[in-house]
Image (spheres, grey):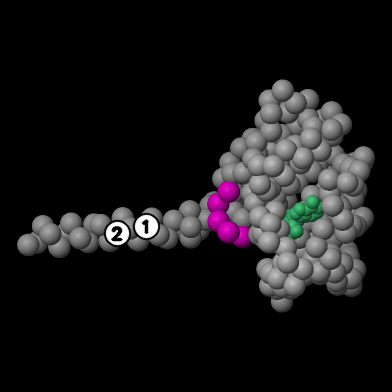
Amino acid sequence: MNFTILFIFILILIWGGWALRKYIRPYFRRKQLKEWLQHHPKQAQLEISMNALSSLYRFSFSHQVAKFSQITRGLKQQVYLYGEIDLLNFIYILDKLNPNTEDVFYDLGSGAGKAVFTAATAFPFKKAVGIEIIPELITLSRSRLAKYHEQPFDNISHCQIQFIQGDFLEIPLKDATIVFVNATAFSARFWQYVLQKLIALPKNTRVIINTHTLPEQYFNLISQDYEIMSWGLTRVSLYQRR
Ligand SMILES: C[S@@+](CC[C@H](N)C(=O)[O-])C[C@H]1O[C@@H](n2cnc3c(N)ncnc32)[C@H](O)[C@@H]1O
């Protein structure tokens, strides 16, 4: 009898752990990231950026705006599924690439613009550009930009910030040195078009890509790890164009 109860208890524990894995693994990853920040030489500056970013996006309701646009515009394709970066984790990812004042950041499918503002406030980028196809998300990004230009955010960096509404497949990325694609939801077919766009990037351009991988023939892998996104942990790979 006791053995049966113990067995059921262990089964419940295993099932609970499995059911909660979406929350447990990001919890431990976040703990690691907080520790990483504690020991970072620019900890104070990065914390100021984090606070500015959190304040910038307070009450922005980006997921709801995306959902509303999908429903009202009938955007049913997988490619429009909305999800976002985690602010601290994206600082960690960009830090690996050690951006400098000559670097230009592009987010292909920039959503509410969080990755663009993270690049602009936490690192010395020359320019940060977001390209997004959904007009309501561009309106949201530009409203954050207007807020950003109010004090005190504007003092954090001198990075030029731009949000372009359109299809990133059709927009030239001529000055890009670091390109981010949050590509988890991209279908296999759409991914092939994105891949051609990335292959056309100039030598040495660095690429941050979620879930998908890039061919060795064209890209050197810099690092690969599981990072926090708004929906949970996702594989993020950093590459450099050969
Ligand atoms: C997963 S969200 C990522 C948002 C943002 N990059 C982030 O990580 O916080 C992907 C975004 O790509 C946009 N998108 C999809 N196809 C696009 C295209 N061809 N051109 C521009 N944006 C596109 C979607 O509307 C969506 O907002």
Whether residue 198 can be seen here: no
Dot 1 falls on a residue whose secondary structure is helix
Horizontal and vertical percent for residue 37? 63, 53
Residue at coordinates 65% horizontally, 42% vertically from top-left?
188
Residue located at (55% from left, 56% from top): 232
Residue toward you, 113 or 120: 113
Place residue 151 in its image quadrant.
Answer: bottom right
Q: Amino acid at mark 1?
A: Gly
Magenta range: 230-234
**Local crowd size for mark 2, using a 10 Å CA cut-off: few (<14), some (14–19), many (≥20):** few
Which residue, given by chain and number where applicable, does mark 2 sit on? 13
Disc 1 designates what residue? 17
Residue 70 left/right relative to 144 = left
Quarter of the displayed picture in which ligand 1 can be seen = bottom right
Q: From the image, give the main secondary structure of the stretch colored magenta.
A: strand
Q: Is residue 94 left or right of residue 143?
A: left
Is 158 in the magenta? no
Give 116 or 71, whichever is nearer the viewer: 71
Q: Toward which corner of the image does residue 222 lie, by quadrant?
A: top right
The answer to whether residue 170 is above or below residue 135 is above
